[in-house]
Amino acid sequence: MTEPDLVPFPDRYVPPVPADEALRTFHDALRRRRSVREFSDRPVPRATIEWLVRCAHTAPSGANKQPWRFVCVQDPAIKKRIRAAAEQEEREFYARRANDEWLRDLEPLGTDENKAFLEVAPWLVVVFQLAQTDQGGQVYYLKESVGLAAGMFLAAAQLAGLATLTHTPSPMKFLGEVLGRPAHERAFLLIPVGYPADECRVPRAALHKKPLDEVMVVV
Ligand code: IYR
């Protein structure tokens, strides 16, 4: 058996301001995040997107396997193909696949099969989950791991003043095909990233959060 190799906890983070203040500031940024469907075409530098991926990539993962890939699309021709394929799936979803309750739940959001934002947003970041490591090894708690990384990506984008959307065209198989990804990668989430359009609106329904005592139980 290999001995665990434990080292002193390096570079431990200590907030530069009192913890309550740090949390208030962080919460104030997070609470103002909205899923945006009307993007500006204002460019976002590649270096900024790299920082977002770096932040996401700090996430914990099962046995530290880091079973994710962030495919960052800025090529207009590829965005166009993604939009066409997504809209094809979404037409099917709205016409047939979604049941009545689902469609009713979506009504307040005003979503439909038109996904112009897939061409307008300067970046489409497609998060892939890896069913095995690139070397063919096992991965663990795959959805939990990739979900954590995706959450950190969204938080980082918010801190950078960037808008995001957690878009899940369903099924998402076409993303692996359009992006030429290997068989062990499966699309998990498509995140358009950019600035909101000047005239951007968001659904009123999305402003409501349940009160804390509904989501938090202390025993
Ligand atoms: N994927 C579809 C439908 C959709 C589903 C849920 I759940 C949402 O929160 C929003 C949309 C679409 O993108 O239109």
Image: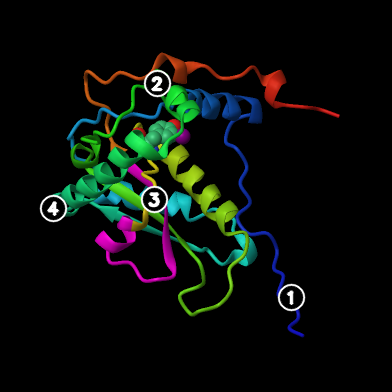
Image quadrant assignment for residue 88? top left
* Residue drawn at 48 percent across, 56 percent down: 57
Residue 95, numbered circle: none
Name the residue that disc number 3 marks: 171
**Mark 4: which amino acid?**
Ala
Mark 1 neighbour class, 10 Å CA radius: few under 14, some 14 to 19, many 20 or more: few
Against 160, is 207 above or below? above
- Identify the mark nearer the N-term, 1 or 2: 1
State the separation of the CA atoms marked 4 and 1. 48 Å
Residue 7 in the image: x percent, y percent?
69, 68
Name the residue that disc number 1 marks: 4
Contact between marks 4 and 1 (CB within 8 A): the answer is no
Give the SS element for disc 2.
helix
- Identify the mark nearer the N-term, 3 or 4: 4
Residue 119 magenta: no
Closer to the camera: disc 4 or disc 2? 2
Residue 62 in the image: x percent, y percent?
63, 62
Name the residue that disc number 2 marks: 107
**Mark 2: which amino acid?**
Glu
Q: Nearer the viewer, residue 195 or 207?
A: 207
Mark 2 neighbour class, 10 Å CA radius: few under 14, some 14 to 19, many 20 or more: few
Closer to the camera: disc 1 or disc 2? 2
What segment is highlighted magenta in the picture?
Answer: 174-192
Image quadrant assignment for residue 216? top right
Q: Residue furthest left?
A: 77
Q: Residue furthest bottom?
A: 1
Contact between marks 1 and 2 (CB within 8 A): the answer is no
State the separation of the CA atoms marked 1 and 2. 53 Å
State the separation of the CA atoms marked 4 and 2. 31 Å
